Image: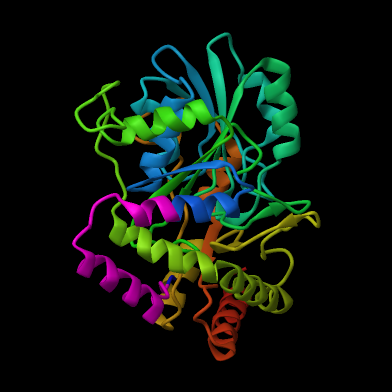
Amino acid sequence: MAKPQIGWAERRAVSKVLKSGSLAQGPMVAKFESDFSKFVGDRECVAVNSGTSALHLALLSLGIGPGDEVIVPSFTFAATANSVALTGAKPVFVDINPKTYNIDSSLIESAITKKTKAIQVVHLYGLPADMNQILKIAKKHGLLVLEDAAQAHLAEISGQRVGTFGDAAAFSFYPTKNMTSGEGGMIVFKDSSAARTSRLLRNQGMEKRYQNELVGFNLRMTDIHAAIGIEQLKKIEQRTEVRIRNANFMNSRLPATISPFTPGDLRHVFHQYTVRLASNRDAISTELSALGIGNSVYYPTQVHKLPSFQSDLNLLQTQLATEQVLSLPVHPSLSKRDLLRITDGLLRLTEKYL
């Protein structure tokens, strides 16, 4: 399903850090933050040890806490809602658009209460959410907007990159993501004071040693991970183009009824290539695996139905998506022969089962 591409440039960069003896957060982290800032329109960036930490610290730095509510989708990885709950706030779940799998912007206003403080938007699978409408709703109701861009490096809306629309954004560099630092995350801030708060929180509440201003965490990124991230960032554009080419090739061979939907003004960066199978999804998945074709379900469970949240909400489109989606390999290491095997295998099985 994924194949992290680690080359000699990354190995040399890590070796240089190891030889320096300065392994923890240091000059390489600062450079990675600076380089990533250019990547997201010169917004302030704060590197942390994971994408989940990025979401958590972004919310805390924006002032989210006990008594607040944050609107989130339920069709996502649990970290989206976990990050809200970890602040003491309550995640309020909203259904998705069945074509894009992103939060349905037409349903957001009905979920807003006097306690609502923010909307946390997920750009799922690398497809941007309906940010223009979401920002209008946020402005109307005085709400903050946090973009969960963990899967959406270089995704765009009318030429503007995701991560630059809201008050803050969180990116992930987990090994399966479109770029990796081995492990890590990056918070992107519109406001410099929120960025400073985040820097304090990631480092025991201090900027200067032993001068703790807040009760904080140890969520720092290491220079080892940052060195990998710096090199990966240089290659992300070219690798993203390959992902898009691979996806377009697969689209050309698969029926439009099952292939991913991409509106014309959006740049989908295909963290996952996700098809929709109206029936027998699990049987098709099993047979694809037997053919040696990687596949996985992202995501098989509605987050609001997890034991950690136990909501009684009925989110029909979210439920259907958990029962029907199936993701296939689309990463840059695939050859044309691989893509033919994947699409041929799926075509044969859809003829059999659908």
**Which residue is found at the position 69% from the left and 53% from the top?**
156
186 in relation to 268, above or below: above
273 in relation to 135, above or below: below
> x, y percentage for residue 30?
40, 50
Left or right of 43 in this view: 266: right
Left or right of 258 in this view: 83: left
> x, y percentage for residue 205?
28, 27
Q: Residue furthest right?
A: 264
Of the pair 214 and 183, the residue shown nearer to us: 214
Which of the colour schemes (rainbow, by chain, secondary structure, one colour) is used? rainbow
**Which residue is found at the position 62% from the left and 38% from the top?**
103
How many badges with numbers are in the image? Answer: 0
For residue 304, which quarter of the picture?
A: top left
**Which residue is found at the position 53% from the left and 68% from the top?**
234
- Inspect this view and state whether residue 313 appears: no
For residue 270, which quarter of the picture?
A: bottom right
- The majority secondary structure of the magenta stretch comes to helix
Q: Residue furthest top?
A: 114
For residue 212, which quarter of the picture?
A: top left
**Which residue is found at the position 53% from the left and 32% from the top?**
72
Left or right of 241 in this view: 337: left
Quadrant where the image shows the N terminus: bottom left
| Magenta-span inclusion, residue 24 | yes
Q: Which region is colored magenta?
A: 3-31
Quadrant where the image shows the C terminus: bottom right
11 in relation to 278, above or below: below
Left or right of 348 in this view: 179: left
- Inspect this view and state whether residue 20 appears: yes
> x, y percentage for residue 332?
53, 77
| Magenta-span inclusion, residue 251 | no
> x, y percentage for residue 173?
42, 56
